[in-house]
């Protein structure tokens, strides 16, 4: 528009006259849009998909337009928040993230309705990987014997003293696991370490565990991931 306005400047039109003409053209354009505007039913999936396709129409979407429209609609519909009075807020910056995973085809892309973390269970052979509607416990403390802050000296006088130290460690870990198992979790996630002994008690009770998961690793709750 500025490039077109240069011709009027060359003809000695005052800038205020040019701006006034642009504002008048804007008013006329808005009036035309108001006449052709139509109400949209957000629950009408076919109508919403048509709108999305018209907004993202490019050479790339000519081949994958249906897939991208479905992904976009599913993601925004899931994280939308009803504000009342027919208003709905969709914060795509906070609750939606596009995650690219190596391998596969573009057609394999899908909306993951939940949280995705790049971690595996500690003992894949003994702990479940697939759990439907799990009870999850999040810990920011380690499930291992607490070590000394700087340096710890232990004097072992008798041979039995070493066995006593090991037994104290086992009893400490066992007591932690017993307290956790009282809540009947299906999955335990800790930000710190998790000892082999704790893994034994948890796997024996049928509980899966993930360790060393930083608070910054998983996305905020309600966030949806679009896997590409």
Image: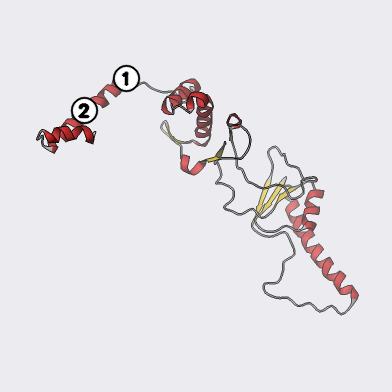
Which badge, 1 or 2, comes first in the chain's sequence? 2
| Label 1 environment density (alpha carbons within 10 Å; few <14, some 14–19, many ≥20) | few
Q: In which quarter of the image is residue 156?
A: bottom right
Q: Crowding at label 2, few (<14), some or many (≥20) Cα neighbours within 10 Å? A: few
| Residue at 81% across, 53% down | 200
Q: Which of 166 and 125 is in front in this view?
A: 125
- In the rendering, at what x and y percent does residue 188 appear? 70, 50
The picture places residue 32, in percent across and down from the top left corner, at 27, 22
Judge from the rendering whether residue 136 lies leftward or rightward of residue 37; answer left or right: right
- Closest to the observer, 179 or 9: 9
- Give SS at disc 1: helix
- Please name the residue shown 48% across and 24% down the image: 62
In terms of image quadrants, where is residue 221?
top right
Q: Looking at the rendering, in which quadrant would you find the N terminus?
A: top left
Residue at horizontal 76%, vertical 47%?
207
**Distance CA(mark 1)–CA(mark 2):** 17 Å
The residue at 67%/58% (across/down) is: 192
196 or 17: which is nearer to us? 17
Say which residue label 2 marks.
25
Can you say which quadrant of the picture contains the C terminus? top right
Considering every residue shown, the one lying at the far right of the view is 159
Q: Relative to residue 157, is residue 197 depicted above or below?
A: above
Residue 208 in picture, x, y percent from top left: 74, 47
Residue 31 drawn at (x, y percent): 25, 24
Q: Name the residue under label 1.
A: 36
């Amino acid at each position: 528009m500025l490039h077109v306005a240069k011709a009027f400047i060359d003809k000695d039109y005052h800038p205020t006259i040019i701006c006034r003409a642009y504002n008048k053209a804007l008013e006329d354009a808005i009036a035309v849009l108001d006449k052709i505007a139509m109400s949209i039913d957000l629950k009408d999936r076919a109508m919403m998909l048509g709108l999305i396709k018209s907004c993202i129409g490019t050479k790339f979407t000519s081949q994958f337009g249906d897939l991208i429209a479905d992904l976009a609609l599913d993601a925004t519909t899931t994280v939308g928040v009803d504000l009342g009075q027919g208003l709905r807020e969709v914060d795509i910056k906070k609750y939606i993230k596009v995650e690219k995973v190596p391998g596969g085809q573009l057609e394999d892309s899908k909306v993951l309705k939940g949280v995705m973390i790049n971690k595996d269970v500690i003992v894949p052979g003994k702990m479940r990987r697939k759990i439907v509607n799990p009870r999850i416990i999040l810990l920011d403390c380690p499930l291992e014997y607490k070590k000394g802050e700087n340096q710890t000296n232990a004097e072992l006088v008798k041979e039995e003293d070493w066995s006593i130290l090991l037994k104290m460690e086992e009893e400490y870990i066992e007591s932690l696991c017993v307290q956790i198992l009282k809540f009947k979790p299906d999955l335990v996630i800790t930000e710190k370490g998790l000892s082999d002994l704790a893994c034994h008690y948890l796997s024996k009770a049928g509980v899966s565990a993930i360790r060393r998961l930083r608070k910054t690793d998983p996305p905020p709750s309600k966030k949806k991931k679009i896997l590409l």
